[in-house]
Amino acid sequence: MGSLTRFVITRIALLIPMIWLLVTIVFFLLRVLPGANPALVMNPKLTNEQVELISESLGLERPLIEQYFDFLIKTITFDLGVSYRTNIDIATELGLAFGPTLMLSVFGVLIGVPLGIVMGGVAGAHRERYLDHIIRLFTIGIYSIPIFLVGIFMQMFFSYFIPDIFRGNPTIYAILKEIFPPVSLMDAGNTGEFNHYTEIWLIDTILSFRLDLTLDLLTHLLMPSLALGMLIAGVIARQVRTNMIYHLEQEYVHFARARGIPENVVKYRYALKNSVVPTIGLISLQFALLLAGAILTETTFNIPGLGRFLFQSLQEKDFPAVQGVMVLFVIIVSIVSVIGDVLYALLDPRITY
Amino acid sequence: MDLSIRETRTTNGQKNIILSIFSFLRQNKSFTVGMFILSIIVIMALFADFLAPYGYAERSGDRYEAPSQDHPFGTTLLGFDVLSRVIYGSQVALIIAFSGTILSLSLGVPLGIISGYFGGKIDRLFTLIADSIYSFPSLLLAITLAIYLSVFGVLKVVSAVAVATSVVYIPTYFRVVRSQVLQIKEEGYVKAARSMGAKRITILIRYIAPNVLASTIAIIPFNMTDAILTNAGLAFLGLGISPPTADWGYDVYDSRALVKVRAYPWLILFPGLMIFLLSFSLSLIGDALNDKFNPLISQKNAK
């Protein structure tokens, strides 16, 4: 067995203790820390009947250690209880909400990562010159605006302000309104018009041969993905720039120049390539940021994903639902960190295990 | 920073430290601009009582008045003056940024020093805990803590948000400090002190702590930025500081509906702009410090 295969297998095996540890933190945060009935702590206005029902379903009268093992077993079997808000099984709800979040995150990464690499590379190559300063201002600026404000301003600008300029020209107005729809993931009612095979609507609409709906979905995803992508791009650009500056001072770069290799090849093929590889590790570490961004972006754009589900559960003080979302997020974070590590190992030939 | 100060001192003597600070500011435009914006906001917070035309929860006009001479930034649903709320909001924002940072510094740094210096089982335990908190999604952690701390009523809501945001940053300080201590404790002067029979506590406080603190400087501004942004994020999820306290995050949350943004844009624009300006100034400072202290970036080619 090759060393890489062995590494991948060990890393995947390590997933189990990592998820166990993080799920334990969730248990500690949600069950031990509040001291009393956590649902009551979250929502003091519950009726006695509801409180009894909850303490029964959570097994609150039993000792903590028993509750803990019960919680672990329920997590493994994905038995997350029933939401107070909708009376639907939480695992089912999460399954429905997962698709939109996945689409948003994937498109956010697809926009953000290349943009960040290009910006970071250019900034590093133009260190302390005006391109560097402009990119630096952009990356710092985008990091400093709360992402929900970015979302709100984008909606105001593209969905209302720009179309309003072209109000005199109905065709352009209609096209703009079509490209930058103000809210939600799809036009209302459209979700019933295709077969829900995977609940990842992008795949479902294609499989149902409703490419018009796919296009509609993509236009609705454009602005939220851009908002999330810019946040990711800013973080990555900063890291790539730092690495780029480091690599441009290394001997292999001087040597490549001395051999007469064109400057652009030296900068953007040699140095940039080496600057990007360590960033892969960063992307998986920054996944928590992406999740936070996704929660807030979904709430802003009213996307029916995990983030909005969490938001609604928080608004309604729905304890089992909040607990369920946290468990799922923790599992996602663990899996992404493994994917990041494996990608890093595949890309960096120096690393042997 | 170090270099420029030393050079001026040798040529001009001790008293020209002010000059050397100026030369540092001239070289670091982003640092200077960041400091400038930050000091204006600090002044706003300190003299809010004199600067604000009305109280932050005083019905000084009709509902949703557009910006006018009496109310330069307009009024809210309840007739509160937006300008006054923006000015008073700087107090809350700075309290959260500073108290959150002090809290995470005062826990992360000592734990990192202890963990790095003593090693062994303590080190492994602390590192495990720090790593798990580090990989736990920070907004989720803040959300959970904010729920409990605010519901318990043990702490006031302002400090609840500060605690929630600071816990997230403890592992960051812990990691940086720990790795620094691992290097420093093998340095000659620490070994010399130990061989002369200095007490452990003396070595920790007099020789190791001052050298470690430098490595945390570049993190502090980003910590403050994140505290402000997390506070805004919590407020946006409805978990922030409860009204009528003037909080930018709450004001943005309260006026986030697109219908409202279209009809009364000043409600979201000004508090949103203030959140941006404060985080932006802190990030500028942090970025300048990062360029100075990041070991990956050498100083020789910098202008």
Image: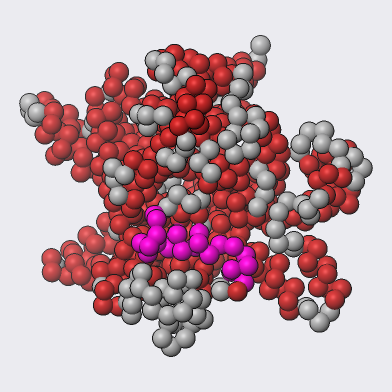
Q: Where is residue B248 in the image (x, y as percent from the top left)?
A: 43, 63
- Where residue B221 appears, as percent x and y from the top left, is 36, 54
Q: Where is residue A293 in the image (x, y as percent from the top left)?
A: 56, 48
Residue in the foreground of this view, choosing between B28 and B270: B270
Viewer-nearest residue: B200 or B23: B200
Q: Does the magenta stretch include residue B251?
A: yes
Q: In which quarter of the image is residue A45?
A: top left
- In the image, what residue occupies the spot 30% across and 18% down? B121
Res B277 seen here: no
Give the side of residue B297 with respect to residue B201, left or right: right
Query: In the depicted view, which residue is nearer to us: B23 or A98?
Result: A98
In the depicted structure, whether residue B194 falls above or below residue B105: above
- Where is residue A320 shown, x and y percent of the image? 54, 31
Residue A55's place in the image compared with A175, above or below, is: above
Quadrant the C terminus of chain A occupies: top right
For residue A97, above or below residue B117: below
Quadrant placement of the N terminus of chain A: top right
Q: In this view, does A221 lie to the left or right of A37?
A: right
At a point 56% along the width and 19% down the height, the residue shown is A74
